[in-house]
Image: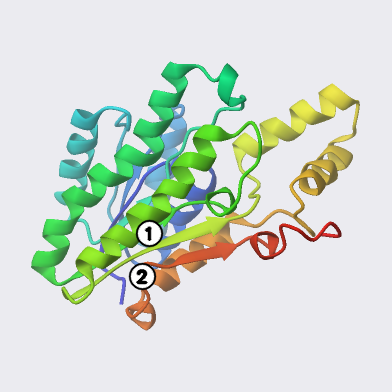
């Protein structure tokens, strides 16, 4: 049922967003990519998705901290086929600092990209979704939108606020046709950013790559291994299918039980 729909996925040039873009393209959706990276690599990604799945795949390099560029991104995506049917608010920036040491400019940019951009894209997408009587919005929150860790104030705050945006959007759209808005709350996912943090841990503590990987997960109380981006992308697809049309306003953890067992010292 997703064939022919158009999906706008922010932060989709790498990591979880790239996995989502691939999953939507494989399901027959046209895709608008957005994110940063080396131009040639992004063009390869775009061309490979389009050729492999026979869909339209475009790219717009909007800086999501800038409302004018957000609007330009949305206009470009809305011109694909019949408009933006699926919006995945995935883009995120992360900082690691305590509150008293946090740089105010970094705070402002985190709020802009992690929270204000999803708001702007949602307000731009809703009129077309209402007109067509169909729409899906998926906000990528986090296990840290449910709980917290020290030194992550911008991430915890914005990912928690995304749950509020999700519920507010669901409240305003329920009963207005087949439109839903849900949030996904992943645990630790092996993304390029995570790989950097593991390498830093290995260097700082003299650990092997495998040992650093295990220690990284242990400190986050996540048993087993990292959550595969492809599995999270499959959850996104499910939320967009007709089987999930009655699900809206939800916050779905996919975190190996971390958020269900914060106080369990054995986890």
- What quarter of the picture does the N terminus occupy? bottom left
Nearest the viewer among 263 and 25 is 263
Residue at image position (66%, 46%) is 190
Q: Which mark is residue 240?
A: 2
Residue wearing tag 1: 138
Residue at image position (62%, 25%) is 98
Q: Is residue 149 left or right of residue 136?
A: right
Viewer can see residue 174: yes
Q: How many marks?
A: 2
Q: Is residue 237 left or right of residue 31?
A: right
Relative to 153, is 23 above or below? below
Q: Position of residue 78 (x, y in %)?
A: 16, 50
Q: Name the secondary structure under disc 2.
A: helix
Distance of label 2 from label 1 (alpha carbons): 8 Å
Nearest the viewer among 195 and 188 is 188
User: How busy is the neighbourhood of tag 2: few (under 14 within 10 Å), some, or many (20 plus)?
Assistant: many
Q: Quadrant of residue 127?
A: bottom left
Relative to 73, is 239 above or below? below
Residue at image position (47%, 33%) is 41
Q: Name the secondary structure under disc 1.
A: strand
| Pointer 2 with pointer 1, Cβ within 8 A | yes
Q: Position of residue 21 (x, y in %)?
A: 42, 53
Q: Is residue 35 left or right of residue 141?
A: left
Which tag is nearer the camera, tag 2 or tag 1?
1
Q: Quadrant of residue 205?
A: top right
Q: Position of residue 216 (x, y in %)?
A: 78, 41
**Disc with the residue nearer the chain's start (2 vs 1):** 1
């Amino acid at each position: 049922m997703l064939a022919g729909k158009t999906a706008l996925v922010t932060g989709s040039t790498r990591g979880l967003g790239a996995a989502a873009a691939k999953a939507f393209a494989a399901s027959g959706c046209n895709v608008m990519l957005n994110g940063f990276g080396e131009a040639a690599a992004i063009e390869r990604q775009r061309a490979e998705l389009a050729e492999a799945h026979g869909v339209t795949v475009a790219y717009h390099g909007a800086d999501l901290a800038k409302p004018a560029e957000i609007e330009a991104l949305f206009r470009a995506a809305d011109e694909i086929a019949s408009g933006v049917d699926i919006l995945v608010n995935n883009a995120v920036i992360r900082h690691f600092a305590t509150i008293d040491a946090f740089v105010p400019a970094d705070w402002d940019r985190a709020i802009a990209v992690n929270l204000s951009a999803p708001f702007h894209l949602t307000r731009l997408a809703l009129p077309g979704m209402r007109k067509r009587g169909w729409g899906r919005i998926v906000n990528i929150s986090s296990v840290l939108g449910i709980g917290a860790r020290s030194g992550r104030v911008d991430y915890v705050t914005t990912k928690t606020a995304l749950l509020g945006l999700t519920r507010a959007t669901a409240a305003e759209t329920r009963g207005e046709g087949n439109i839903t808005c849900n949030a996904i709350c992943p645990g630790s996912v092996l993304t390029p950013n995570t790989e950097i943090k593991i390498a830093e841990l290995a260097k700082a503590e003299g650990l092997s790559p495998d040992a650093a990987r295990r220690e990284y997960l242990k400190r986050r109380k996540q048993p087993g291994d990292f959550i595969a981006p492809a599995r999270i992308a499959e959850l996104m697809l499910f939320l967009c299918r007709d089987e999930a049309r009655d699900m809206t306003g939800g916050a779905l953890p996919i975190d190996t039980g971390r958020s269900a067992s914060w106080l369990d010292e054995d986890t």
